[in-house]
Amino acid sequence: MRNPYLDEAFSPDRVMDPRSLGALQPTRLSASRSFLARMLREGWSIRRDLLELDVRGNGAARYTIETPMGSITYAAWLSEPRGVNRTGRIIGSSWDMIGTLIDGIASDDQIAASAAELPKLYEGRAPEGTLIWMRSNQSLRLFKHVRDSLAAGQQPDAAEVKRVGYLMRNTGLDGNGTFGSVSFPAIPPGHPLALSYHAQMLSAYLMRELSVDVVEELARLDAPDTAVALAPEVRRHIGVGNGSALGLVMFVYNRPALIHTYVSLTVEAARHALELPIEAGDPRFARLEALLDRTIQYRALEDTQYRVFTNGKQLAADLRRIRAAVRAARRGDIERAPGETPLAAAHRFVNGRVSPEALSTFNTLLIELAPDFADALVQDRLNFDETLDLDPQLPASAVREALLDTFGWVFRMPLNDAEHRDRVWYQSRAAEEPRSGPAEEVPGAHEVIPNYPTRARELLAALDAVDPQTPIGSVIAGRPALEHVARSAVALRGMPYAVPHADPHDIDFVPVWLVRLMNSCIHGLDRTEDFLNRSVLGLIYDGAPFRDELATAHADEWWWNYRPAVTEDPAAAAPGSAAPVLSPKVSAIVAPRHDPAERITMKFRELRLAGGRAMQALEVPEGSWHGARDFFVTALIADPSAITGFAAALARELDETGRARAWRAPAAEHADGALVIDCRGASLHTVGHVLVHRIAAAAAESALDVHLVDLRPDGAEPGLALALARVGIDWTPVRAEDGRFRAERSADPESARARYDDGFAALLREGIEVPAQHWWNVYYPGNAGLYPDTPLSRQHTGTVKDVYVPGQQLTRLFDPAEVANSADPNRDTDHYIPLANAHHASV
């Protein structure tokens, strides 16, 4: 018997509200917790093979991770902290540590290539077998305090170590095809890092290990005769710092299958626990009450300064109320609906009486009552397909049904006034930094988040205006901006937890809820402190065991476990603090020259990212550039030399300032027994996705002749044939030089589609090798799709205090008094602090 209360409590309308998403807490399914549990369960070990440092902090380190399935190498290069471009934001280019995670035992050539390429970052290329590239910075004030204390033979102030919580702060974990790294779908089943985010979480764990090793070694170099190691009771307060902001909101909206997987598994695990036949007197009540006791103490005594989020003491008070309801359920003294378990009755009673964070915390603890069930979900379901397919021959009636099923919430959601729905999400030419602000403050900025509330309404009107049997390809060919919402409506049907039920283009939208969804629920961070509704600073592995403790640690004991810090007299503040100098690197739009013989292997993710940006530069509109991007990738799968044609198209269409003429959709008519499509002088790369919809829809019933007029092929002709084969259409040249072709439904559509599937699988596994110069001739001009860095645009970042100058025009996102009275959430400063002593670098 289904429980109607649980149906409502875990319904998409409830769960996908942004306030509810932001309240979701770390669980056993979150990446950092599930990864560490796997390490402990399988008996992984970590060995430090190398740590060579000079007294200023320059040097190198290497570690080997041994797993039952094979070895993994972590190599890092460390530098003396510098004061230029030192920031946790993506625009930073000053890093105290750069590192790489390499599959297997890394060769000398792999290490040497990594050392040479990592500092280049965006222009660098990872050697084969690279899983992750990473960057981090020291906390500086705390790092110096710990170093000086250890060198003097003393332990640092434990209370200050706990307050800050990290010696190194993550500033980037890049993988999944970025910079030539291994695409995660290409990692084989059974690999130790095959599950979602486990490669990143191992990287973060190793950052933490390295941070302690480095501070202890520097203390030893400072004072070999007196230096001591960190005491375990102090070391336990050290995690990895992590700051996140608007880029994660873009991620949430552009990775819907991933979001659905994590949220739906969390719902499934919590609901499973609530439906367990745990009756009064069951010993599992004692386990739950012990977890509540532990969590109440942890929250009541933590000192994180939350702003939008529920603070620790309020959360502890709510958890006490939940504990009382659990105790009543344990005694059998709680009112139950027919067929309802005691735990479900307790859940129903507290729902609405406690904060969303408290209810989510309760769900986290309930999941611990069925750990094997949750672990099986992680193992079996955290590999997922993110492909969004749409058959152009699908009838309008079917798409309409899917639209109302997938995006029905859009039509029920009240929208703000049009003049207050003018928020744009874009990337800046300042190091591709994600930004968001009022559209009038950044005219011409290219939108990167799908505008579902608007496009869904437009699509419904377009579908209602045609015959129900009209192929959707015909509708999209006439309205290309509706392509992405139509594709999403069909592909995400059956994924009710894929898209937040919110309007991110509403000027009053609160981004921090979705930033915290990623940080807490998915990544597993804690102490997630918010700032100005848009950025979150949190800790990874707060309280987790270190490598020398793995053999005896337990996966369910380290988190939400209060560890007192013995407070000593705090060390004097380090002198000489100065504001950092921020001069972000501006993304160039002209490619540097490369050796014509040099070749480069591109992976799916970077092809997709650069292709999408280039389509925006070419003015392909919001709602349609996603399809153009995917066609570009298809063209390269069909024939890698298409990269040359697309580079030529960019050179032809973009002027010296990076501006392109207005994009126009192809126009079609039937004449002389053929479908005549006027492409208006466009490159096939930019209109190929529209042609696929138009041609496949027209060929749905019978074969037809197609005449493509005024089209610049730019090497993408094989891509058009492959894209049509993907949807079951055979494309035969008649007089290709005159643009004349024959389209008809394939006699064997599965085999036709397999051509694309096989090519795409090869791309994920191996990448595509192209001339380096041709790739950079796409990558750099594509940066014209990024918005120029302006004083007003800089205020659209995750932080404001470090860029706003009093008296300067302030973005209308904020009230001036709000900014003036706000405090930066950094528990430690990222400001540059010169070394007090004149240490000399070794030679």
Image (tube, rainbow, N blue to C red):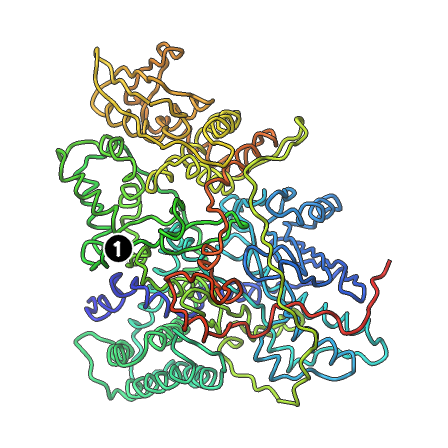
Residue 11, picture quadrant: bottom left
Residue 649 horizontal/vertical position (percent) = 47, 27
Of residues 350 and 22, the one nearer the viewer is 22
Quarter of the picture containing the N terminus is bottom left
> Local crowd at mark 1 within 10 Å, few (<14), some, or many (≥20)?
few
Residue 341 vertical placement versus 652 (above, below): below
- In which quadrant of the rendered image does the C terminus lie? bottom right
Question: Depth check: 274 or 226 in front?
Answer: 226
Residue at x-position 73% and y-position 81%:
149
Residue 506's x, y, as percent? 30, 58
Position of residue 162 measured from the top left corner of the image (x, y, whole percent): 58, 80
Name the residue located 57 percent from the left edge and 73 percent from the top edge.
544
Q: Tell me the residue that label 1 is attached to.
A: 419
Name the spot of residue 289 as percent of width and height, x first.
39, 84
Most foreground residue, 622 or 748 = 622
Q: Amino acid at mark 1?
A: Glu
Toward which corner of the image does residue 214 lie, by quadrant?
bottom right
Q: Is residue 59 visible?
A: yes
Count every numbered label the image shows and give the total: 1
Q: Which type of secondary structure does the marked residue at label 1 adopt?
A: helix
Name, please, the residue furthest toward the front.
807
Q: Residue at x 42, y 21 (%)?
A: 713
Q: Does residue 824 sit above or below 13 in this rendering? A: below
| Res 71 seen here | no
Based on the displayed image, in which of its 4 quarters is residue 326 positioned? bottom left
Up-down: is 2 above or below 418?
Answer: below
